Amino acid sequence: MGTQEMLDNLSIVITWFISLATDVMMLFLEMPLVIFTAASVVAVAFGLVRKFFRAKK
């Protein structure tokens, strides 16, 4: 295995690592959005269930 192959493999690993790091960063940036969306969906579902039970009584 020559030096050029090692350099090629190293550049591939670095590129992969950078793309992975960007994905993780994007995930952390989107996390509040995901939590907010999930919370609002749960709130809406909870409101519908309460309305449904109130209508049944």
Image: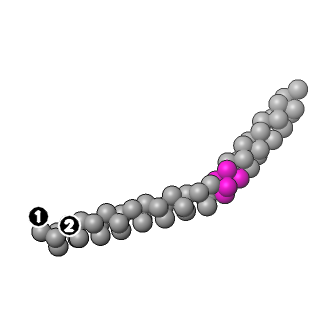
Q: Earlier in the sequence, mark 2 or mark 1?
A: 1
Q: Is residue 34 magenta?
A: yes
State the residue in front, 30 or 57: 30
Residue shown at the point (47%, 61%) measured from the top left: 21
The single residue placed furthest to the bottom in the displayed view is 4
> On the rendered structure, is 9 left or right of 50?
left
Q: Is residue 41 magenta?
A: no
In the rendering, at what x and y percent does residue 43 appear? 77, 44
Q: Secondary structure at mark 1?
A: loop
Per the model, the C-alpha gap separating discs 2 and 1 is 7 Å
Residue shown at the point (82%, 35%) measured from the top left: 50
What's under tag 2, amino acid-wise?
Met
In the rendering, at what x and y percent does residue 37 appear? 68, 53
Q: Main secondary structure of the magenta part?
A: helix
| Number of marks in picture | 2
State the residue in front, 40 or 6: 6
The single residue placed furthest to the left in the displayed view is 1
> In the rendered image, which quarter is residue 48 located in?
top right
Q: How is the image coloured?
A: one colour
Whether residue 55 can be seen here: yes
Would you name the residue on which mark 2 appears? 6
Tell me where the magenta segment starts and ends, as one range. 32-37
The tag on residue 1 is 1
> On the rendered structure, is 57 left or right of 24?
right
Would you say the residues marked 2 and 1 are in contact, meaning their CB atoms lie under 8 Å apart? Answer: yes
What's under tag 1, amino acid-wise?
Met
